[in-house]
Each structure stands twice: as C-alpha cells, then as structure tokens.
Amino acid sequence: MSILEVCQWLQDTQIGTAIRESVWWFPLIEGTHVLALALSVGTLIVIDLRLTGFIMKDRRVSEVSRQLLPWSMTGFLIMFATGALLFWCQAVKAYGSIYFKLKILGLLLAGINALIFEFRTRRTIALWDADAIPPLRARIAGFTGMILWAGVIAAGRTMAYNF
Amino acid sequence: MTHIYLPAAFSLHPFFQWCDSTAVGEAIRDSRVIFPIVESIHLLALTVLLGSILVLNLRLLGSGLRSQQVESVAKSLAPLTFWSLLTMLVSGALLFCSEALKCYENPPFWAKMEMLAAAIVFQYTFVRYAARSARAKRPQHILAACGSLALWFGVAAAGRAIGFY
C-alpha cells in the first residue's frame, strides 16, 4: 500500500469521516489547535528569550525553563493530539500539500534542535546558568528554535489556503 | 445586519464601506500572497501575545515562575505583550480592510471586537494594578488572571470563528 493509499484509508475511516462532516467537531478541534499555540510555542518562546539573553537576565536559565517547560510540554501534547485528529480527517489533502510537508520538516528540525540542546549544550549549563547572556551555542539553539517554530506556524496557516 | 448596540442613524456601515474601498484593502484583496502573509504575521504575534499573557497569569495564579515576584515577571513580559499586541492590531487592521464588508455581516467579528476592547482595558488597568501594586493581594491576583485569560482566549476563539462562520 502506498502512503497515498494509507492516507485515503485513514480519512475514510469512521472517525475521519465523522470529524470531517461534523458541524461542531472540526471547528472545535481546529480552534483548540490554534489556541493551544499560546501554551505550547507561547511559553517556549519565553524560555527561548531567556536563553538568548533578552528577558529575565537576572534569573538563572534553568530556573525559568524548569518552571515553564512543563506548561510547554502540556501545550505540545494538546497540539499533537488535535493535530493528529485534523490530519486523520483530511489526510489526502495534507499529503498533497507542500506546506504540510514543510511543516513536518520544520517540526522534525525543531525536535532535533531541542535534542542537541538537551543532550549536548545543556550538559555545561552549570558554567553559564546565571549569565545574563548565555554562550553563543546556547543562543544559537534559542534563535534556531524560535525561527523554526515561526516557520511551522506560518506553514501550518498557509496550508489551509490550499485545501 | 445592524449592530445590536447602535441605532440605525449611527450605523457604522459607511465606515466599513470606506475601509473596504481603501487602496490597501483593494491591494490585499487583489493579491494571492499578501493575505496569507499578513495572516501568518497575525498568528505569530498571537502566539507571543497569548504566550506572554498566559505566563503572567500562571504566575498570578501561583503556578509558574514562582521563584520570581509577580511584579518582576510582569515587568519582564510587558514589552513582549505590548509589541505583539501592536503587531496584532496593525496586521489585524490590514486584514480587516481587505474584507470589511464581509466582517460587517459576521457576528463573530463583532463579538471579537467587543471582547478585544474589554481585554485591552482590563489588561492595562486591573491586571496592571494587580501585578504591580504592593497592595494587591491573592484575591485580586486570581480575579485579574481569570478575567484576563477568559477575555484574551475569548478574543482568539472569536477570531478563529470569523473564518468558520
């Protein structure tokens, strides 16, 4: 079975069809997906702005991220759940959209950026945790994250114009 | 549709008509790319605006950034809130001009504008007082946070609903 056929099968399932044809479910899921941007990317940006040395410079990086990251992660959980449902009900259109592919690429790169930060850059955090402006490596991770998320949001929004 | 709070003599329809006929509105309508670009900017600013408001409200509720004083969190986030709000108002005005007459017939649009006016006033009066005054105590913090969350997320939800209506 090709990927396209899988997409076709997926959106023809009972749940996929039900969401697509519903009066309320689709707008509710879509609306939640948009509003959860505040919790996911919105709180992550505050952490990234600390990491790049723009705000809360007198507080430790770890102090800011430790307290906000659980909220970001809750937000991303909501994003992935609602996003999966949205894909479920219109998989074929999404598969055919260049913006959807760009969005997935952006998500993958943002994930890789986060993993590199978590497992490499963060290991030395004790040395620069209290710095008003963290070292270049950490700042690059913060900037890259913000740019990638902006790209993901723009691609996600643009997708809908071609549906 | 006549707006519910205004008698017919004070109709805003001519104003909407004028916005719709401006060169800016026409240029955005005629272009296939400008609207999606402005809309993306509007959405990016929304992320920053709601994000900064959410973090302050979490602090007011006592469940995020508790190691910092409410006032210091409010001061750190104020520029983010202000500049993202300004970006939203400008990009929003551009989007509006391109479809002002459509908005006039759109109930979620009116709901959004009313909640937006209330949200801005509430944010820069009561929330500001609750977050920055030493006299404000826990009840004011909770009231400010709940009111601000309800208003701003209401604005966002109504904004999304404009496109669904």
Image (cartoon, rainbow, N blue to C red):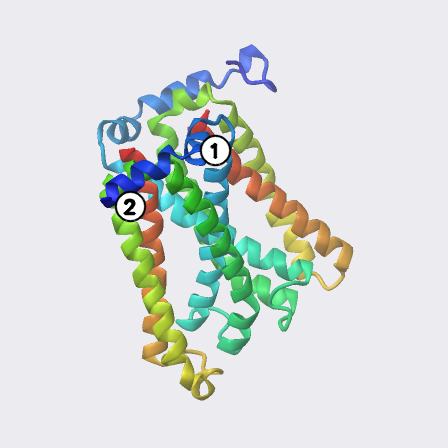
Residue B155 position, x and y percent, is: 53, 38
What number of labels is visible?
Answer: 2
Say which residue label 2 marks.
Answer: A100
User: In this view, which residue lies farthest toward the top?
Assistant: B8
Is residue B126 at least partly visible in the picture? no
The residue lying at 30 percent from left, 40 percent from top is: A7
Q: Subunit of mark 2?
A: A
The secondary structure type at the circle numbered 2 is: helix
The image shows residue B7, relative to residue A106, as above or below, that is above
Q: Residue at x 60, y 49 (%)?
A: B124
What amino acid does circle 2 point to?
Phe
Element under disc 1:
helix
Task: Tell me residue B7's x, y (percent).
Answer: 59, 13
Q: CA distance from mark 2 to mark 1?
A: 19 Å
Which of the marked residues, 2 or 1, is nearer the chain's N terminus? 1
- The residue pinned by badge 1 equals A27
Residue at horizontal 57 percent and vertical 38 percent from the top: B154
Nearest to the observer: residue A115 or residue A153: A115
Name the spot of residue B8 as percent of width and height, x first.
55, 11
